[in-house]
Image (cartoon, rainbow, N blue to C red):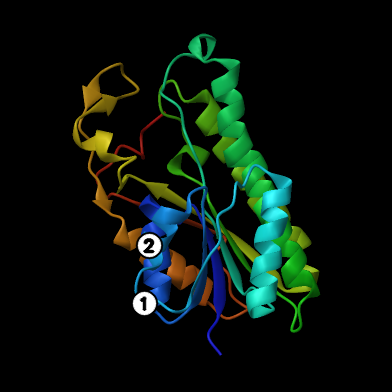
Amino acid sequence: MSKTILITGAGSGIGRATARRFLQAGWRVALTGRREAPLHETAEGHDAALVQSCDVTDPASVEALFAAIEGQWGRLDALFNNAGTNVPGRPIDEISVEDWLKVCDTNITGMFLVARGAFGLMRRQDPQGGRIINNGSISAHVPRPGSAPYTMSKHAVTGLTRTLSLDGRRFDIACGQIDIGNALTDMAEAMTRGVPQADGSTAIEAVMDVGHVADAVLHMASLPPEANVQFMNVMATKMPFIGRG
């Protein structure tokens, strides 16, 4: 029987590319996001897709998502915990509390709620176990100028990854993190027009095809239970990462 994976934020960008890659590889894929229409666009032409809208910041919505997955398939083999958001860059004293909470609600609380749901299902299913892959960022290592909410949230994701890796051992639940740099999606399109640099200048940055990210996540998810990619950086070769910050 085909393996099952849940992908959050599957209606666009990295989530959409990754969902389509898994469907092409023969996985059964649960696609979730706030709006159903983009999810159906992602899943078009694939019978192995389960579309379920979900607000990852809402505990009841997340519980309903996992109830749907369990009811449909009875188990979950993998989670790509991908949903995230950002706000425009500016110095910390110019960042509104509302913007801070918006980023934290999705990038931290949403990550926690979805990981919690996946961990619980993987723990109680038979056979027990599974794999959680968290979407971090190059910002989980070094910041961009004016990125306090996003950078703090992605450092928190790394803490979640490490904790799940430890707590999941006795339940055969592996956890890894993929840190992505400059994959060309609508969100990263600004890189091709010029973005602020650490020295105060603005520069165009190298980007890569988002398909490379999807391939990397598929590799991580396809490993046997005794192997795990703990952390992986996938980035445009010439982007300013080494030497940034």
Residue pointed to by mark 2? 42
- Indicate the position of residue 18 as horizontal and vertical percent values: 40, 63
Neighbor class of circle 1 (other Cα within 10 Å; few <14, some 14-19, many 20+) is few
Q: Who is closer to the viewer here, 41 or 4?
A: 41
Number of numbered markers: 2
Quadrant showing the C terminus: top left
Residue at the extreme front of the image, as rendered: 37
Tell us which disc is closer to us: 1 or 2: 2
Q: Amino acid at mark 2?
A: Thr
Against 166, is 122 above or below? below
Give the label on residue 66, or none.
none
Query: Compared to 45, does 213 lie above or below?
Result: above
Which type of secondary structure does the marked residue at label 1 adopt?
A: helix
Residue at image x 39%, y 54%?
14
Q: Secondary structure at mark 2?
A: helix
User: Which mark is first along the chain, 2 or 1?
Assistant: 1
Locate residue 127, reporting x and y percent. Answer: 74, 84
Up the image or down, 95 lies above or below 80; here it is: above
The outermost residue toward the bottom is 1
Residue drawn at (74%, 68%) of the image? 121
Asked whether, in this view, residue 152 is left or right of residue 235, the answer is right
Query: What residue is drawn where x is 73% and y is 74%?
Result: 172
Q: CA distance from mark 1 to mark 2?
A: 12 Å
151 or 57: nearer the viewer: 57
Q: In the image, residue 201 lies at what x, y percent?
A: 25, 18
Quarter residue 44 falls in: bottom left
> Which of the image's four quarters has the N terminus?
bottom right
Q: Is residue 189 left or right of residue 234?
A: left
Residue 24's disc is: 1
